[in-house]
Image (spheres, helix red, strand yellow):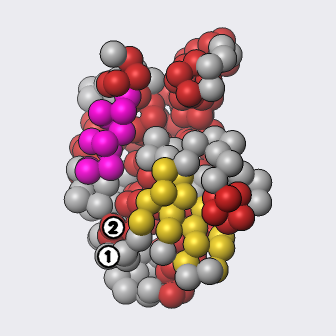
């Protein structure tokens, strides 16, 4: 199976963590925004990452890919079968993808992607506004919602943890530092999720990329 995408995308990172946790073999084909790679173009009709080619079955969108893979490889389950746990997991995936990653995207795109990858100026006011006005409310919500179990849903890792922890890496690339006094649970939970073997090597790789960009 081929996965198309860049390790700095929160949606690609979520998928990479998921694949690692499942033990599914894959090859990551690195592509950037607007990449002309014909395999990527064929797999992603709107040119967004991630996309995949599983023996000729083409699919784009991290959620579509993960839900396809969960049906194909049910063990170990990362989307719980219990109705309430499943509902909560999908809520968190939605929060991670469309709320948290949207906020991180405004900062990451305008401060890093536009100037460093696309060679144009980003909208720094939009980035500053997202950081000052959107992010604190989202972090406060998350802080109050992390259960004592150390996982967002139930007693073990689910897609929820991967989806919500992933954008935190982009906030970090933008220089956002979590205040352990205000958000101690996020600090502890995210450290545990992001240091899992399914994610840590990818994050180390992107940290090296980011260091080169700013060096
Ligand atoms: N809902 C999609 C979002 C994918 C997405 O927006 N990816 C961004 C990179 S983080 C992208 O490819 N942007 C390029 C574009 O919008 O043209 C998913 O979960 O895969």
In the image, is 190 to the left or to the right of 152?
left
Residue 212 horizontal/vertical position (percent):
34, 24
For the point 59% across and 34% down, the residue is 105
In the image, is 187 to the left or to the right of 153?
left
Disc assigned to residue 20: 2
Residue 97 horizontal/vertical position (percent):
59, 51
Q: In which quarter of the view is residue 170 placed? A: top left
Dot 1 corresponds to which residue?
23
- Determine if residue 159 is in view: yes
Quadrant including the C terminus = top left
Q: Name the element at disc 2.
A: helix
Q: Is residue 213 above or below residue 28?
A: above
Viewer-closest of 176 and 215: 215
Give, as a single range, the part of the protein colored magenta: 200-210
- Determine if residue 96 is in view: no
Asked if the residue at label 1 sits under 8 Å from ligand 1, the reply is no
Residue 31 horizontal/vertical position (percent):
55, 48
In the image, is 146 to the left or to the right of 122?
left
In the image, is 37 to the left or to the right of 19?
right
């Amino acid at each position: 199976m081929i996965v198309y995408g860049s390790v700095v995308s929160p949606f690609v990172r979520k998928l990479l963590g998921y694949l690692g946790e499942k033990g599914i073999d894959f090859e990551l084909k690195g592509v950037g925004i607007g990449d002309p790679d014909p395999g990527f173009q064929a797999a992603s009709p709107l040119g967004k990452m991630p996309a995949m080619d599983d023996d000729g079955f083409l699919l784009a969108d991290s959620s579509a890919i993960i839900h396809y893979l969960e049906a194909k490889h049910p063990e170990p389950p990362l989307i719980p079968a219990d109705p309430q746990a499943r509902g909560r997991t999908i809520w968190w995936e939605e929060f991670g993808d469309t709320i948290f990653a949207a906020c991180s995207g405004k900062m990451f795109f305008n401060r890093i992607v536009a100037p460093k990858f696309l060679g144009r100026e980003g909208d720094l006011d939009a980035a500053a506004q997202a950081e000052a006005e959107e992010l604190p409310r989202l972090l406060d919500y998350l802080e109050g919602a992390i259960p004592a179990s150390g996982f967002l849903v139930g007693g073990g890792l689910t897609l929820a943890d991967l989806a919500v922890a992933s954008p935190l890496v982009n906030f970090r690339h933008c220089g956002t530092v979590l205040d352990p006094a205000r958000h101690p649970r996020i600090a502890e939970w995210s450290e545990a999720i992001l240091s899992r073997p399914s994610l840590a090597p990818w994050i180390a790789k992107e940290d090296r990329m980011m260091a080169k960009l700013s060096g």
